[in-house]
Image (spheres, rainbow, N blue to C red):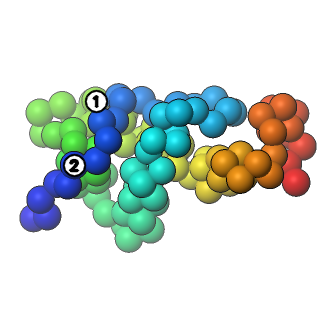
Amino acid sequence: MQKPTRGPHVDDIAPSGALLTRYDEGHLATYSRMLDADKEGADWREVSRIILHIDPEREPARARRAFDSHLARAKWMTEYGYKLLRGGVTGHELREGKLS
């Protein structure tokens, strides 16, 4: 089994709003790793243990909640968040559904 590598601390639930947060900016590598694991079909328990540093055996509900919210946010980042990082769309445009 792969030994977990330490990254930034992750919250139990990732942000879910339409605006990019400092949390998002600080967890770009986490989101990228989540997307890679998803693409490879990795088991959510392994991802929780290795990437999120939450033991799914000891805290199954917390691990699943963190996994689901961080994967959802990672997918949101691919569609909207990186445009916000690059300045390609404003928060107002995102809320109004006016993406370029």
- Name which of mark 2 and mark 1 comes first in the sequence: 2
Front position among marks 2 and 1: 2
Q: Name the residue located 20 percent from the left edge and 55 percent from the top edge.
A: 5
Residue in the foreground of this view, choosing between 26 and 98: 26
Question: What amino acid is labelled 1 in the image?
Answer: Arg
Question: What amino acid is labelled 2 in the image?
Answer: Arg
Q: Name the residue located 30 percent from the left edge and 36 percent from the top edge.
A: 9
Instruction: Tell me the SS state at disc 1.
Output: helix
Task: Inspect this view and state whether residue 28 appears.
Answer: yes
Label 1: how many Cα within 10 Å (few below 14, some 14–19, many 20+): some
Residue in the foreground of this view, choosing between 2 and 85: 85
In this rendering, the answer to whether 35 lies above or below 25 is below
Task: Inspect this view and state whether residue 48 appears.
Answer: no
Which residue does the numbered mark 1 point to in the structure image?
62
Please state the horizontal and vertical placement of residue 47, each as a whole percent of the image: 28, 53
Q: Is residue 61 left or right of residue 91?
A: left
Say the numbered circle drawn on residue 6. Answer: 2
Instruction: Tell me the SS state at disc 2.
Output: loop
Q: Name the residue located 21 percent from the left edge and 39 percent from the top edge.
A: 54
Q: Is residue 70 left or right of residue 100?
A: left
The quadrant of the picture occupied by the N terminus is bottom left
Q: Name the residue located 39 percent from the left edge and 50 percent from the top edge.
A: 30
Please state the horizontal and vertical placement of residue 18, each as a whole percent of the image: 69, 33
Q: Is residue 97 left or right of residue 47?
A: right
Please state the horizontal and vertical placement of residue 8, each as a whole percent of the image: 32, 41
Please state the horizontal and vertical placement of residue 2, each as a whole percent of the image: 14, 64
In this rendering, the answer to whether 50 lies above or below 12 is below
In this rendering, the answer to whether 3 lies above or below 24 is below
Residue in the foreground of this view, choosing between 92 and 69: 92
Instruction: Quote the CA–CA distance across marks 2 and 1.
Output: 19 Å
The quadrant of the picture occupied by the C terminus is bottom right
